Amino acid sequence: MSTMKAAVFVEPGRIELVSKPIPSVGPNDALVRITTTTICGTDVHILKGEYPVAKGLTVGHEPVGVIEKLGGAVVGYTEGQRVIAGAICPNFNSYAAQDGAPSQDGSYLIPQGMCGCHGFKATAGWRFGNLIDGTQAEYVLVPDAQANLAPIPDGLTDEQVLMCPDIMSTGFKGAENANIRIGDTVVVFAQGPIGLCATAGARLLGATTIIAVDGNDHRLGIAQKMGADVTLNFKNCDVIDEIMKITGGRGADSAIEALGTQATFESALRSIKPGGTLSSLGVYSEDLKIPLSAFAAGLGDHKINTALCPGGKERMRRLMNVLASNRLDLGLLVTHQYKLDDIVAAYDLFAHQRDGVLKVAIKPQ
């Protein structure tokens, strides 16, 4: 077989399944046969044309699979081995990587007007489904495989590790960027898959009052299973007032914004104490504005941290260790399964958030 099925971006509003050549393997690459992948909110931005990619590019960036073929320079792995690779796949040779920001390996900006969007395209170290063919296919070529392939521990299913390449890594980075200390109060705005992982990460880092905010009671129920102590449905209360009551008027020590809208960003900023931290995980499709009062006119000692999910085999190893230790079960987030042949229907479900969907497992075989 010399061809494979792959989901490609055709034009805004259209992702289709087509036949493409199976990639050739270079010395530093690995060809991975995909056993499970998924659809991310960023893929929906691509589908809608809000984040520009080349026409005909295979989309997706969350690979779980089996090594089909190894490049000659890749050692320490075997063909037939179950592996994952991070959504961000740096080679660790760049200035950014050696300066402590490997997720920005290869980062550059395209100015307004050159990329077909109204702002810029920030590539950072994100290659799968952005700069190179991605994972919603029967096979994916993993670049710099020595740095990026991570073996899956025995006993862990595809569904359990499916969140590691992006969602878990991103959510945990949001918690890490929130400067959480033991005994802190942390608010997590939006309890989609990334927000749920941020809630779990805040618990693991020592926060003792975790407030989960969403407009969906079902997701708030899952947030409690992930570690939330208090849940607030913004449709039923004034969230900022409630947070101030819970904290005795002090405000939260930190807030994690996991949706990517002006409203959630502003609410997160208003919820934190003077000297508090706003950890932003959202992918924003419009300009953000910082209200004068929420920012205390610049006098509030606020810290705003942004993040792109860390990649690389060491990051993936650590995340899978958390799962193998039974401290967290992210298989709960996989609510639907589809065959790769039905990926257009899977996109329709996920993009419109029907039927209680959180994450969709896509199975090529």
Image: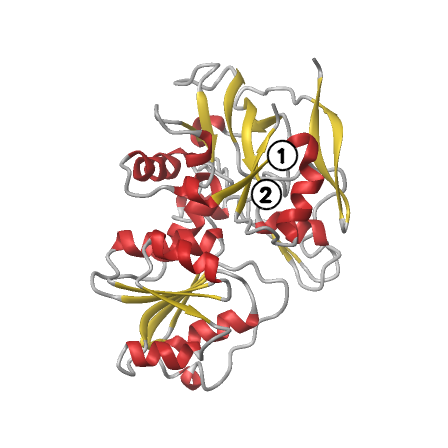
Residue 89 position in % (x across, y down): 50, 37
Up/down of 323 relative to 146, above or below: below
Q: Is residue 232 left or right of residue 251?
A: right
Circle nearer the N terminus (2, 1): 2
Res. 83 mark? none
The residue pinned by badge 2 equals 39
User: What residue is shown at x 69% (from left), y 35% (from top)?
Assistant: 342
Q: Residue 167 location in percent, x, y?
A: 47, 47
Quadrant of image for the C terminus = top right
Relative to residue 47, is residue 6 depicted above or below?
above
Q: For numbered disc 1, what is the local secondary structure? A: loop
Is 365 left, or right, of 4 in this rendering? left
Task: Tell me the CA gap for discs 2 and 1.
Answer: 8 Å
Image quadrant containing the N terminus = top right
Report x, y in % for residue 269.
43, 74
Q: Is residue 70 visible?
A: no
Q: Which residue, as the protein is rendered here, is positioned at the far right? A: 11
Q: Residue at x 38, y 51 (%)?
A: 172
- What kind of element bears circle 2? loop
Above or below, 51 relative to 273: above
Q: Quadrant of residue 137?
A: top right
Q: Nearer the viewer, residue 19 or 70?
A: 19
**What's the residue type where badge 1 is placed?**
Gln
For label 2, count other residues whose C-alpha is less than 10 Å away and answer few (under 14), some (14-19) or many (20+): many
The residue pinned by badge 1 equals 136
Q: How is the image coloured?
A: secondary structure
- Residue 336 in view: yes
* Amino acid type of the residue that numbered disc 2 sits on in the rendered structure: Ile
Label 1: few (<14), some (14–19) or many (≥20) C-alpha neighbours in 10 Å: many
Asked whether the residues under the numbered discs 2 and 1 touch, taking CB atoms below 8 Å apart as contact, a structural biologist would say yes
